[in-house]
Image (tube, coloured by chain):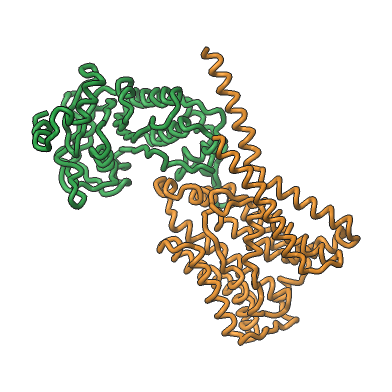
Chain colours: A orange, B green
Amino acid sequence: MSEATHSAQSRKVREGTWREAMLANGSVVSIALFFLVVCIVFSVATNAFLTSPNLLNILRQSAPLLIVAAAMTFVITTGGIDLSVGSVLALVATLSATLLQFGFPWPAVILGMLALGALLGAVQGYFVAYEGIPAFIVTLAGLSVIRGVALLITGGYSIPVDPGSSFTVIGRAWFVGVPVPALIALAILAIAYLAFNETPFGRYVTGIGANAEAVRRAGVNTQLMTLFVYVISATAAALAGIIIAARLGSGSSNAGQGFELEVIAAVVLGGTSLFGGRGTIIGTVLGALTVAVIGNGLILAHLSPFLTPIVTGTIILIAIWLNFRLFRGAVRSR
Amino acid sequence: MSSGETYRVRMSGISKRYNAIQTLDDVSLTLKPGEVLGLVGDNGAGKSTLSKVLSGAVIPDAGTIEIDGMPVTFNSPADSRAARVEMVYQDLSLCDTIDVAGNLFLGREPRRHIAGISFLDKKRMHEQTRQMLDRLGIVIADTRLKVENLSGGQRQSIAIGRAASFEPSVLIMDEPTAALAVAEVEAVLDLIRTVSARGVSVILITHRLQDLFLVCDRIQVMYEGRNVAERLIGETNIEDVVNLIVGRKFNARSAASRYRDGAAT
């Protein structure tokens, strides 16, 4: 009798472990499959896709997306959202071009812009974490105000960066055969992965998304942690703005229109839950790369680039639908 | 300590009023080291409020609390935790998407420092979790399982195990066996016995009267914000307890006689 009970119990545990492994990696596996399929399709359909200059070009172009999406993964995992990243990117791009024109040294401009990003994030994070205003509303206001400031500064014009300036190195130079923006993105992704999975901070970010009250009762300063994820995302957006201004050689107040949606799409595509508590940096990287590869491949295949949003949107819906069925099934059977 | 009069917890004259409702009216409670006290009463009798007073979540209007003979004032849950009083909340203390070890160590994860940055020491965390679970007799196959994949009883065990791991002297449990399968109730009751055998005083709030007779040493009955009775477990039975809980309102329907009965008991 007790023997039977015990074996039934251990079978239940084995099933749990298996399902656990599938759930933990299911979203990552499904986006990895989508990514592979997209890559294979474009490799077959075009000659230019699977060449190292093109692949490096994809990395160079998607660096801002990868950086901000990694940061956004933290925000969304807490159950929040940051809609202001595109506007922060635009403000930083225009301001850095403006400051360089005034003759400020480029290292000072970079540090100043990163600090500005952190400050903007702290202000928004304060309203979310300490004043309890929904992140959607706070950052929607941020999206509007910050973009408005960028437009006001430039009057709507692009501001050129002197092509001789060392500032452009960040966006245009190559180092050991790899574009510098890609190297920066790689470093940021490595840091984000470690922070998310291996540090107490990453653990609390997940915990806040799952059950903020439990984390608070465990003696963690959840408000400060919540504020901090918005500092991270806005600082990452500032870094992306610097890279874009350096690559394009100009600061435009129209830069990054719709960028926030592209970032959120990449994160959600990767399997991070919009409800919070579940996030994955690997998934986000795959999601961002999938979005980037679709855009690149459609152009190489001589198809209209306007198909990009259609294909991306369709894949988002299908991928999330699959994940949703998977998760729903797991919850029901508990 | 040698004297029988030394209580782990001694609450007296505790009153709390929410607007027009007197939730607690001159309530007292005593608890000896290692004792398991069953706190019962109908909904709204004040058991939860009383336990929240002891866990620092509710500040009483009047009354005194002594822990091990020392008068204390609890203004927040942190105060009561400092006095080694832990409360197991029904489902508020677990993060579903974090694994068993992560939940047990939430907020006090073992860390190792590399280049000045603190990283989670997951290996040590899982080893210590395994030891902790074995010590308390909690059966969980893998400490890497996420809590959302555990059964209700296992979740409750983790919540209790987490509270017990703070080495409390008093552990308050609010309905730990509600909504559990039969076999799981047994496991949780075993866990309560294990914890109290380690010298922890336990206050058990439950509607499952049969559980009281399995683990409690003593039962305290509350009715409309007052203590109405205290019974040693050997000196009472389930019918007696039921009568005390419903306040004999079946004998005397008028409010006046109900109050008289309450005061007389």
Q: Quadrant of the C terminus of chain A?
A: top right
Report the side of A107 relative to A125 (left or right). Answer: right
Q: Nearer the viewer, residue A246 or A20?
A: A20
Residue A268 rendering spot, x and y as whole percentages: 63, 55
Q: Residue at x 53, y 18 (%)?
A: A5
Q: Is residue B135 visible?
A: no
**Residue farthest toward the top in the current orientation of the protein:** A1
Q: Quadrant of residue B40?
A: top left
Report the side of B227 relative to B170 (left or right). Answer: left
Q: Is residue B55 visible?
A: yes
Report the side of A290 relative to B253 (left or right). Answer: right
Residue A57 rendering spot, x and y as whole percentages: 80, 65
Q: Residue at x 36, y 23 (%)?
A: B193
Q: Nearer the viewer, residue A115 or A308?
A: A308
Residue B90 rendering spot, x and y as whole percentages: 39, 38
**Residue farthest toward the right in the current orientation of the protein:** A47
Q: Is residue A269 above or below residue B173?
A: below
Q: Residue at x 59, y 50 (%)?
A: A279
Residue B96 rendering spot, x and y as whole percentages: 51, 42
Task: Please state the total of marks drawn on the protein image.
Answer: 0
Q: Is residue A63 above or below residue B115?
A: below
Q: Residue at x 47, y 62 (%)?
A: A134
Q: Nearer the viewer, residue B26 or A60?
A: B26
